[in-house]
Image (cartoon, grey):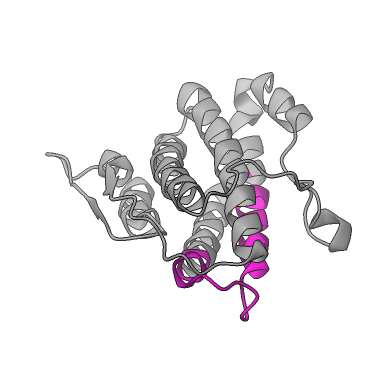
Amino acid sequence: MVKRYVTAFALLALFGFAGCSSSTKDDAAGGPAAAGEVTTAAVPASSAHNSNDVMFLQMMIVHTGQGRELAALAEQRSTREDVKNLATAVDATQGEEAKVMTTWLQGWDEPTQSAHDPNMHANHGGLPALGAEQLADLKKAPAADFDRMFLNLLIGHQHNAVELTNLVGDGSGRNPETQDLARRIKESRSDQISLMLTMAAA
């Protein structure tokens, strides 16, 4: 019981939208569903940007979409309340992130879809991107194995998000809003990984 409430409060801290000012509303019970109720304003980014800013946003849009696919499976199949809370928060916050990143790219007249290989970082020592085969395996996983498989996949997936932020880190990017987004994503995903490692060990 204690673990469940600790996770709920942790989600409130970890899953505020990473990219811009946001608000979360506690429900009447003060429960974890509030972590998914995120509101944001998709304000256009300033015009200064370079190819790294564009690549980062394009690849993160794809990445957030994959994360939401994972989350949707967990919302449907998980037997653990804390895992379902996590999935709800991932779906809500990463959906908002994708909206804002899309708005920024459109404001720059840049395509929102990436022509880059999602496994480009795996070729340089990073983790491979989440693939259709992994999602298929998760869909058909036995109920007893689902939560463990889901957490392991999402841990790796969020680690890839941390790696993607390096595209605009250390001055590689030019746009200040994109750099701030990357910093917030790096911090929030790192904290989420720590939380999920604890959940996976439970």
> Is 162 on the left-hand or right-hand side of 4?
right
Task: Decide if residue 70 is on the left or right side of residue 103.
Answer: right
Q: Position of residue 87 (x, y in %)?
A: 46, 38
The image shows residue 198 at horizontal and vertical percentages of 53, 56
Occupied quadrant, residue 136: top right
Is 183 situated above or below 156?
below
Image point (44%, 38%), residue name = 91
Residue 65, position as x, y percentages in the image: 56, 37
- Residue at image point 18% right, 46% down: 26
- Magenta stretch holds residue 173: yes
Q: What's the magenta bit mostly, secondary-structure-wise?
A: helix
- Residue 4 lies, with reference to residue 138, above or below; the image says below
**What's drawn in magenta, residue-wise?**
154-182
Q: Nearer the viewer, residue 88 or 141?
A: 88
Kindly give the residue lying farthest to the front in the view shown.
109
Q: Which corner quadrant holds the N terminus?
A: top left
Does the segment drawn in magenta span residue 110? no
State the residue in front, 5 or 92: 92
In this picture, residue 120 sits left or right of residue 11: right
Which percent across, then down, holds residue 116? Answer: 76, 48
